[in-house]
Amino acid sequence: MNLTLHVWRQKGPNDPGRFETYPATGISEHMSFLEMLDTVNEKLEAEGKEPIVFEHDCREGICGCCGFMIDGKAHGGQHKTTVCQLHMRSFKDGDELTLEPWRAQAFPVIKDLMVDRSAFDRIIQSGGYVSVRSGSPQDANAILIGKEVADRAFDAAACIGCGACVASCPNAAAMLFTGAKITHLGVLPQGAPERFRRVQAMTTQMDMEGFGYCTNHGECSAYCPKGISLDVIARMNQDLLLAQVVTRDEVRREGGE
Amino acid sequence: MILESKAPKGDIQTAWDRHKFDVKMVNPANKRKYTVIVVGTGLAGASAAASLGELGYNVLNFAFQDSARRAHSIAAQGGINAAKNYQGDGDSIYRLFYDTVKGGDFRAREENVYRLAQVSVNIIDQAVAQGVPFAREYGGLLANRSFGGALVSRTFYAQGQTGQQLLIGAYQALMRQVNDGKVKLFTRTEMLDLVIQDGHARGIITRNLVSGKVERWVADAVVLATGGYSNVFFLSTNAMGCNVTSTWRAARRGALFANPCYTQIHPTCIPVSGGYQSKLTLMSESLRNDGRVWAPKNPADGWDSSKGKVGKDPRQIPEAERDYFLERRYPTFGNLVPRDVASRAAKKACDDGQGIAYEGRGVYLDFGDAIQRLGKDAVGERYGNLFEMYERITGDSPYETPMRIYPAPHYTMGGLWVDYNLQSNVPGLFVIGEANFSDHGANRLGASALMQGLSDGYFVLPYTIGHYLAQVGPRGKSTEWDSFKQVEGEVTERTDKLMSIKGKRSVDSFHRELGLLMWEHCGMARNAKGLSLLLQEIPRIRAEFWENVSVPGTPGELNQVLERAGRVADFLEFAEMMALDALEREESCGGHFREEHQSAEGEAERDDEKFQYVAAWEFKGVGVRPELHKEALDFRYVKPSKRSYK
Amino acid sequence: MSWFMRFARSTIGMKVAMAISGLLLFGFVIGHMLGNLQVYIGPSALNHYGAALQGNQGLLWVVRLGLLAILFTHVGSSVALVLRAKAARPQGYRKWQGKVSTYASRTMRVSGPILLLFIIFHLLHLTVGTVHPDLQHCATQATGDLQCFVYQNVDAAFSLDTAGTTMAVQLGIVAFYLVAMLLLGMHLGHGAYSMFRTLGLNSPRYDKVARAFATAVAVLIVVGNCSIPLAVATGLVGAAGGH
């Protein structure tokens, strides 16, 4: 099949950027979306033109590298699918597709469809962990954790940090991402001691990064390739409210107010 | 060169404890005077960087991805082994040790393997303490499953995403150290060379992948945790960015590369669907617990390349015309034979013309019987998410029609040679995780890769690196040393050369050409003729690469083609050493199958008399035959025996 | 800065302020509607209700100022948050497609300002009387009782043949009320559901119930509030019903 691509091209953060149109010809329905772009890029390279830059690595939907908007839908919008796992059989001959990078103040464009998501790392740095040293903690079975709790933690921990939640949110909020980590660690007994400190530090960092806020549209969860539930945001809100009541010490982030 | 394993003598069960006591310790107040470079943020790299930071060292940690959470450890599905014996089914440290040595076909160092088995129990404790959500039973205890044909249930798992969850645990520990300022993390930064000063590894040269800036980094020790080299085959289950560059650059600077021919092929991957294919996807081995592998008896029912499809819909092929070749050849183990055996059997069926996928490379994995026996719901419960993944990629539902599978490279047991302290022959250069050669021998057991990466990073390296640092003491550090200037000059020169060729062929076309040849002649089965051919072909491809590769853009910006070109250039040098190792090892062992060395029934034949050693190769120049150094292997506990799965 | 101010200025803090003020306004809307529905009982009931409210000026003003403060919090935090969302995505998409967000959720920022305009209009219409053809304020009778004319005022407000105005103007006013009430329903429907989540009060178990409850109350408010101008305009209530 043959398609027409309108692709956002931007040399760097200071370039205003523009859409450019490329034909994608001789595409097999068995190709993944990224393999389709590989084909386009090989042609560009052969013509001595710069290929379209996009982030990718594992190409099996788990590393979280890939992701951009296809016709205004994060990862192309297929249920629980990253763009590397999206296959061309979901498209038809003659389709015109618009490819845009994730757009958010906190995700500056590096080049073309590649954005800088280091804000996510800084949110985790602010408290998205259990403070435990490598060494000899107690036996793994010493603390019993019911299956329901373990499953709930897992469901939240399945986040791959791709940024589709921010990209699809009308407010460019990172609350699904932040809430997922707060829920993952907060429901487990191992994460309980730092539960309130964590939620305060992480949400402060989230605000400092310039993300928006949640108005409960639910787009983040709908476009999340791992189907992280919107409930993690409610859990985060609840924890932050509780933290205002039960904590004694102030939790501040450097640079935060 | 004499290769000293430095493994403690005497009783193996107390060896590691004795060793930990015997090693020199760094005074806690002095730790901040040391800087350690860790390259890579996978399970081994992240866990090592975090642990070293916790101990008080200054750590410089590098990753080529945009975040430390992206490393390919994340893609491991099945689980992680640990000798916890939580199931009370007779598991023990000794049994895990025994299984690993035997599974590695008696080509691993016993002391290393024993330590790995010992430390395995700590890994689970550590991961649980970090909040890794392993599967649990309703009563709250950790769940286990049996994996890869093991006789005990010792595999811990988190659905089909165990690697992801363990990596995120290590990543979080690392982020904590970054927050504390003990680890400085540099993402989108690729190591391009190793700097050796006065015979010790003292630094690296990197390229910032966004700005293109080449930078020098000095430290007291360098740790490589840069993974394996399966992408030498172009198509593998590894991530697109996985490469041999760091380890190969270290090899070029004098580190020995051990057993490069030991590669593991995973039998249940989704077959190639066309020439555009960029990578392969692995489907968990657990599928073979209920799926039956077969190929049509009549080649006419198989792949018809003129039509680009199979001759007959598999559902129309009657039972009598199906060849359940694993069940036929291995009546006892049937579909559950080890990875290498299953892979070779599938290859043989395809070589005999029975293949059923693109270019005749694929066999069926059929759940028809299982669905009839257990019901669709029960099968869905066990494999539902795998079936979904398969359908997403192929468009076919395994509930309706048999899956198509074919083996694919996914792990490399070979790597830089290291001693018991995980230090290479270059003082101050440590190698951990898949990047080293140490623990798996010629074949790796399922669910053991995660175990080894974390064992090295959390529990072994943090002790053994102190031994080295305490011996050398705090030293002056400068990136102005001539060694840095010289190596940086060489790196820049090489980049400029790649940019200046301005040829006609794309980087990928060279990679694909090399990969196909390697897969054909140095893949599942190897023979002297094919390997000799490789040794002629690789230099030819390499020569053409350096004359005709096209790298558009400039080096001073984000340039993904340049990144790939550098990696492919290294594969083109490394592949030659790999083929040579395979040619010289005239026996079949583990993942290395030499067609000349098989029994009448087609089973692998090891030659312990001649080849019970580690082959550690010393680089002598591009196109120059590397020098072989041998580390003899001594089996004091597990006596070599022949594997049989009949 | 105190912990409270820091919390109040965080995005979640502002959302909480919006949720709590929204909850209070929601309560007011329900109370206000229930009071107004007395129009169906008859003039004396509604007028007595009016007199009871007006009779205690002190309390009335406390409530009014309280409502104003709540409204100010609600509007203020929403303005701050909308500005924040703009800043969070300075460059928009050429294309954007929603998957699950509702029309109501996406139009909160449109329905909100229109409702604010409506509130101002409504106050000028039926409280101050600036835009009312003939508003009669409460007056103390010779007996000392307070006499209010809420019923008559409502009648005049929505009747199509009121003296001193034209039918077109009256139709316009009725239409504006109806549109505003529809928007209010949408605003409350999403707002109430969103409030549960913002305050972390939801649970997967009764999430559907919460959503259904929010929708049901919103529908009741729309129906109840719309019925009054419609009833008056069509003559079901008012002069025909007996002055």
Image (cartoon, rainbow, N blue to C red):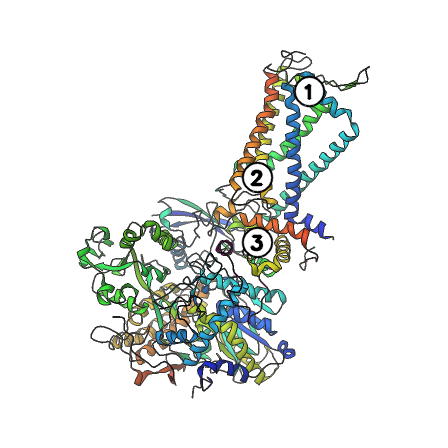
Q: Is residue A151 magenta?
A: yes
Q: Quadrant of residue B147?
A: bottom left
Distance Cα–Cα, label 2 vs label 3: 21 Å
Q: Amino acid at mark 1?
A: Leu
Residue that mark 2 sits on: C193
The residue carrying pointer 3 sits among few (fewer than 14), some (14 to 19) or many (20 or more) residues within 10 Å by Cα, namely many
SS at circle 3:
helix
Q: Nearer the viewer, mark 1 or mark 2?
A: 1
Residue that mark 3 sits on: A178
Residue C143 horizontal/vertical position (percent):
81, 15
Q: Chain of mark 3?
A: A
Q: Residue at x 66, y 36 (%)?
A: C24
Q: Residue at x 75, y 19 (%)?
A: C137
The outermost residue toward the bottom is B2
Q: Is A154 on the left-hand or right-hand side of B470?
A: left
User: Which of C37/C8 is in front?
Assistant: C37
The residue carrying pointer 1 sits among few (fewer than 14), some (14 to 19) or many (20 or more) residues within 10 Å by Cα, namely many
Residue that mark 1 sits on: C46
Q: Are marks 1 and 3 in contact (CB under 8 Å)?
A: no
SS at circle 2:
helix
Distance Cα–Cα, label 1 vs label 2: 32 Å
Q: Bounds of the magenta span?
A: A126-155
Q: Amino acid at mark 3?
A: Thr
For the residues beneath circles 1 and 2, the answer to whether they share a chain is yes
